[in-house]
Amino acid sequence: MAKDFNSQKVVERYDGHIRRLIPGYELMHQQVDAILQSALSADAEILIVGCGTGYELEYLLKRHPTWRFTAVDPSLSMLQKAQALIQALGQSERVQFIHGETAALPTQPKFDAALSILVAHFVPHALKPSFFAEISQRLKVDGLLMTYDLMACEDPQQLKALPLLCQNNGLSTEQSQAMMERLGQDFFTLTFAAYQQLLYSTGFEQVQGFSQVLTYQGLIAQKKQEDILTSELSGKAVFTQ
């Protein structure tokens, strides 16, 4: 069964556990920051889809004092922890928090970039098209999307290596075995090619990879110049490759 992200116990353990569970977690955030910094202006507005406990918000707020953020998360417990963290930093005026999904935001294109980090692999295949189309609709022309997710494994050797790498990060043997059992049960993964196809079909172009650690991969894409989205994107396509 997938973790209950509304559980206070899960929320309190999340920040420590995620670093053992996701190899290269902090380096991935450093890469995201470097790419954003190279592409965005000093007055950028960024959408964070699935802000979790607020780690990426804290990291980016500290490094970019003139950027502004909108953070959405369907878990009220996660959102409240992120809010408390940002309030403690004294940066609440730079972040708008939304409890819910991206669909709750106004549809006018406002954001220079959107981050979906370790989120889309929890979204069922039938809902992925609308998930990404809703992000695209809220990006400015040429706005950037950056994602990072567990991918469908095309190399069995990587699956053998993943629990060993996680054990090196601090997971116990039992925890790493439980993680591997959950991979096929709790996640809706795509191959890299299918993920590219999904983004191309939901309003993005220039889709390419920017990072990979075994079965985890990051993709970067740009919103298309022309708006080709239609109402048919609302959950009709299914990506299972």
Image (cartoon, rainbow, N blue to C red):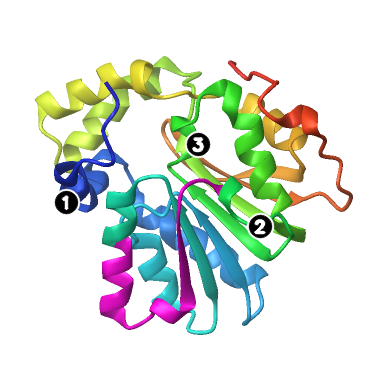
Determine if the magenta segment contains residue 90. Answer: yes
Q: Is residue 83 visible?
A: yes
User: Quick one: label 1 or label 2, which is nearer the N terminus?
Assistant: 1
For disc 1, the marked residue is 12
User: Magenta residues?
Assistant: 82-102
Residue located 74% across and 30% down the image = 233
Where, quadrant-wise, is the N terminus in this rendering? top left
User: Secondary structure beneath disc 1?
Assistant: helix
| Residue located 73% across and 50% down the image | 137
Write down the residue under mark 3. Answer: 120
From the viewer's perspective, tell me whether residue 209 is left or right of residue 161. Answer: right
Q: Secondary structure at mark 2?
A: loop
Judging by the rendered image, the residue that carries numbered circle 2 is 106
Please report contact status of discs 1 and 3: CB closer than 8 Å, yes or no. Answer: no
Quarter placement of the C terminus: top right
Amino acid type of the residue that numbered disc 3 sits on in the rendered structure? Ala
Residue 13 place in picture, x, y as percent = 16, 47
Tell me which label, 1 or 3, sits earlier in the chain. Answer: 1
Name the side, left or right, on which 168 lies relative to 231.
left
Q: Is residue 145 left or right of residue 214?
A: right
For label 3, the SS is: helix
